[in-house]
């Protein structure tokens, strides 16, 4: 992905879409203070640049019968890159694993796993996770409740990293920084 310097309007669009991905382009443009056509161009440019990876619904796990969330810390026998990649590929094939993060420290990975109940998780643990190749140990932590669920990242709309005079230009999308030249996307 190219380095891209976002202006205030781009950050506002990203923040608003992150909060409500179903927002209409007209509403998004109104909130950003621009008209709909340039807003749509900016959204498409942000998608193409990789800032927006996709859109999804925030589904309630409990409503679908997944009442248990477990964070499993996994240690592998080998940390060779090929072994790490094989483990990640295997994890990607397990639907109950909703997130997989490689760690620096005592454990190699932390997995966020959903299950219908504790017995369902134990079956997954014994039949899939601990029996997987290269898995040396697993430490499970049962989530009791989620008090904060904020997907994405904090986006500061008023970040001061924009050159004076560029943030209110309705037709300007965002500025790409490609060493050493800079170009404006339109």
Image (tube, rainbow, N blue to C red):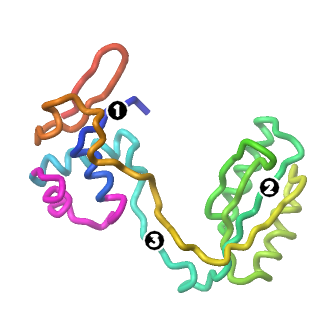
First in sequence, mark 1 or 3: give its number: 1
First in sequence, mark 1 or 2: give its number: 1
**Quadrant of the rendered image containing residue 144:** bottom right
Percent of width and height locating residue 120: 76, 80
Label 3, secondary structure: give it: loop
First in sequence, mark 2 or 3: give its number: 3
**Quadrant of the rendered image containing residue 183:** top left
Label 1, secondary structure: give it: strand
**Residue that label 3 marks:** 58
For mark 1, does the 10 Å Cα neighbourhood hold few (<14), some (14 to 19), or many (20 or more) residues? some
For mark 3, does the 10 Å Cα neighbourhood hold few (<14), some (14 to 19), or many (20 or more) residues? few
Instruction: Mark 1 and mark 2 in contact? Answer it, CB < 8 Å.
Output: no
Give me the C-alpha separation between circle 1 and circle 2.
Answer: 35 Å
Residue 44 seen from this side: no
Give me the C-alpha separation between circle 1 and circle 3.
Answer: 28 Å
Percent of width and height locating residue 94: 70, 64
Instruction: Specify whether residue 24 is painted magenta.
Output: yes
Q: Nearer the viewer, residue 48 or 71?
A: 71
Label 2, secondary structure: give it: strand
Q: Which residues are magenta?
A: 17-34
Instruction: Mark 2 and mark 3 in contact? Answer it, CB < 8 Å.
Output: no
For mark 2, does the 10 Å Cα neighbourhood hold few (<14), some (14 to 19), or many (20 or more) residues? many
Instruction: Specify whether residue 23 is painted magenta.
Output: yes
**100 with respect to 138 (left or right):** left
Q: Residue at x 25, y 35 (%)?
A: 174
Instruction: Mark 1 and mark 3 in contact? Answer it, CB < 8 Å.
Output: no
- The quarter of the picture where the N terminus appears is top left
Q: Which mark is residue 4?
A: 1
User: Compared to 44, does 130 lie above or below?
Assistant: below
**Residue that label 2 marks:** 74
Residue 112 seen from this side: yes
């Amino acid at each position: 992905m190219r380095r891209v310097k976002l202006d205030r309007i781009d950050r506002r669009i990203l923040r608003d879409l992150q909060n409500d991905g179903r927002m209409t382009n007209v509403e998004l443009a109104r909130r950003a203070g621009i008209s709909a056509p340039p807003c749509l161009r900016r959204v498409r440019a942000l998608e193409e640049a990789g800032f927006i990876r996709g859109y999804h619904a925030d589904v309630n796990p409990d409503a679908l019968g997944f009442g248990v969330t477990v964070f499993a810390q996994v240690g592998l026998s080998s940390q060779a890159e090929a072994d790490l990649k094989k483990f990640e590929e295997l994890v990607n094939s397990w639907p109950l694993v909703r997130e997989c993060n490689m760690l620096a420290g005592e454990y190699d990975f932390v997995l966020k796993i959903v299950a219908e109940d504790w017995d369902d998780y134990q079956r997954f643990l014994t039949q899939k996770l601990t029996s997987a190749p290269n898995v040396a140990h697993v430490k499970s932590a049962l989530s009791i409740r989620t008090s904060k669920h904020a997907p994405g990242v904090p986006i500061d709309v008023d970040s001061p990293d924009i050159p004076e005079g560029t943030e209110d230009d309705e037709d300007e999308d965002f500025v790409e920084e490609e060493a050493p030249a800079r170009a404006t996307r339109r």
